[in-house]
Image (cartoon, grey):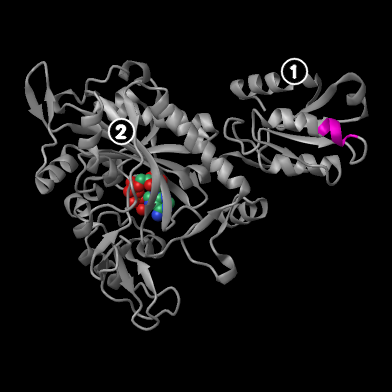
Amino acid sequence: MNIEEITSYCKRTGIIFPSSEIYGQMPGFYDYGPIGVELANNVKQSWWKNFVQNRQDIIGIDGSIIANPLVWKASGHIDSFTDPLTECLKCKKRFRADHLIESKAEMQSDGLKKEELTKIINDKKIKCPECKSSLSEVKDFNQMFSTNIGAVNGNTAYLRPETAQSIFASYKAVMDSTRISPPFGIAQIGKAFRNEISPRNFIFRKREFEQMELEFFTKKDEKNECPFFEEIKSMKLNILSAEKQEKGISKAEEMSIRQAFEKKIFSNKWQAYWTAESINWMIGLGINPEKLRLRQHMKNELSFYSAGTVDIEFDFPIGYKEIQGIADRTTYDLTQHQNLSKQNLEYFDEKTRKKEILYVAAEPSAGVERIILAILFSALTEEKERTVLKISPKISPYKAAIFPLVKKGLESKSKEVFDALKKEFNCFYDESGSIGRRYRRQDEIGTPYCITIDFDSLKDDSATLRMRDSMKQERIKIKELTEEIKKRINKSQA
Ligand code: ATP
């Protein structure tokens, strides 16, 4: 499947469609449909359970989208959250210079300065892809969306371009209201907005998207004291190091996390641990491990705040692309906010009586949409007579679908089963079309179990339970259905 096929599949099945399409498309904005909203909520809930609720060392917040603009001054976004832009001198269409160079000249241009990008465009004679005219020199384009607060013009504020700053800006309030001590993390799931120059590839690059982020704080000299490192150090990953990329090599090599740590691909042990945790979580959702690789950022592409970043990338039909970044953000953000707000953001250690700004050893930051796209590309399977979405039952939009075999005579029993099951899971009731067609519709949206009520059900209080992946059918007592499905979901068998 390619991006276009996934796009039309998502529209047809009610997963995702272009926003406000009746008025023409707004590039970069999409709506979740009835199936997509369930899928996205399940992905987010799974992340929250795994990274917050199941742990003692992580707490969560939900920050506002608009904050005091000084937040973005302190973080550096107002001055430098830019993408390189080039404009057609004739048709005035605008393009992201680095992406244009990558596609037209097939060369990596991450981290190059705008003067260097302009030179490549001139040297390689790259023209406007729309009208073939010449392109302008490359300029910085700030990606933040701005708005006005209240009735006063000029009271500019910004829609947050990342969720991370909400965590740093409310760090003091969190610390004052909890008794948490390092190492610990603050997590958040929420919307972020970036005025991308050219949003593209369906939901891969949107202007409004969601992030699942975690800031993990340690004392500066304890960033390698990760008690879980032993558990994950033998895990093997496909890794593309900065060194290899700097030599022009693009093939990843398999190595253990311990080896990668020794080669300084990870900048600290907590970063290695959160990378492993994130990859294990993704695999648990049904993302194909063979399509994942870890890419270390080269020196010239590192964000200004980062002492080391690794990206988890997925092999999409458009090539390996980032679905999650894990940055070592140092003490940069808290120091900046302390300086500008004049508030003390230091941590006071009761035992040593010492104060210090805590260190963000790792910031795992995943995009909900890119995770969903990787799930779809991993799980959507074309078989001879059907399309099946083989996702983990834990995240499937409906856990079960209930069908009366025929419309007449079975409605009351079928509704009874539906009413009982929907108290426990999100279920779907369908009485229209042939039974085969009804199975196919559920296969396509990943429903792991279909339950058919027939005339025997009225006599023996049993129903047919049909499994999505194997298409095997079993006869099962109606009163045992809920427990049986629960058991299977927990074991994740479809
Ligand atoms: P890219 O280089 O692809 O623009 P980024 O490095 O700017 O991504 P981060 O700032 O590290 O991305 O954001 C963390 C995560 O947020 C990304 O891994 C991605 O999953 C998601 N994300 C970032 N920008 C977008 C976007 N425009 N649309 C959808 N998801 C996004």
Q: Position of residue 323 (x, y in %)?
A: 42, 43
- Dot 2 surroundings within 10 Å: few (below 14), some, or many (20 or more)? many
Q: Quadrant of residue 20?
A: bottom right
Q: Quadrant of the C terminus?
A: top right
Front one among 470 and 291: 470
In the rendered image, the vertical position of residue 211 relative to residue 278, given as above or below: below
Q: Tell me, yes or no, whether the highlighted magenta stretch contains residue 413.
A: yes
- Could one spot residue 288 in this view of the protein? yes
Front one among 449 and 265: 449
Front one among 236 and 196: 196
Q: Position of residue 277 (x, y in %)?
A: 39, 27
Please give left or right for residue 220 compared with residue 476 in the image.
left
> Given the image, on which type of amino acid does mark 1 rest?
Glu
Q: CA distance from mark 2 to mark 1?
A: 41 Å
> Given the image, on which type of amino acid does mark 2 rest?
Ile
Please give left or right for residue 102 compared with residue 434 in the image.
left
Q: Quadrant of residue 327?
A: top left
Please give left or right for residue 175 compared with residue 408 in the image.
left
Sequence-first disc among 2 and 1: 2
Instruction: Decide whether the magenta segment is chiefly helix, strand or loop.
Output: helix
Q: Quadrant of residue 440?
A: top right
The residue to which callout 1 is attached is: 480
The residue to which callout 2 is attached is: 186
Residue occupying the point 18% across, 37% down = 330
Residue occupying the point 19% across, 43% down = 333
- Dot 1 surroundings within 10 Å: few (below 14), some, or many (20 or more)? few
Magenta-colored span: 410-414
Front one among 264 and 181: 181
Q: Position of residue 306 (x, y in %)?
A: 21, 42
Residue occupying the point 48% across, 60% down = 29
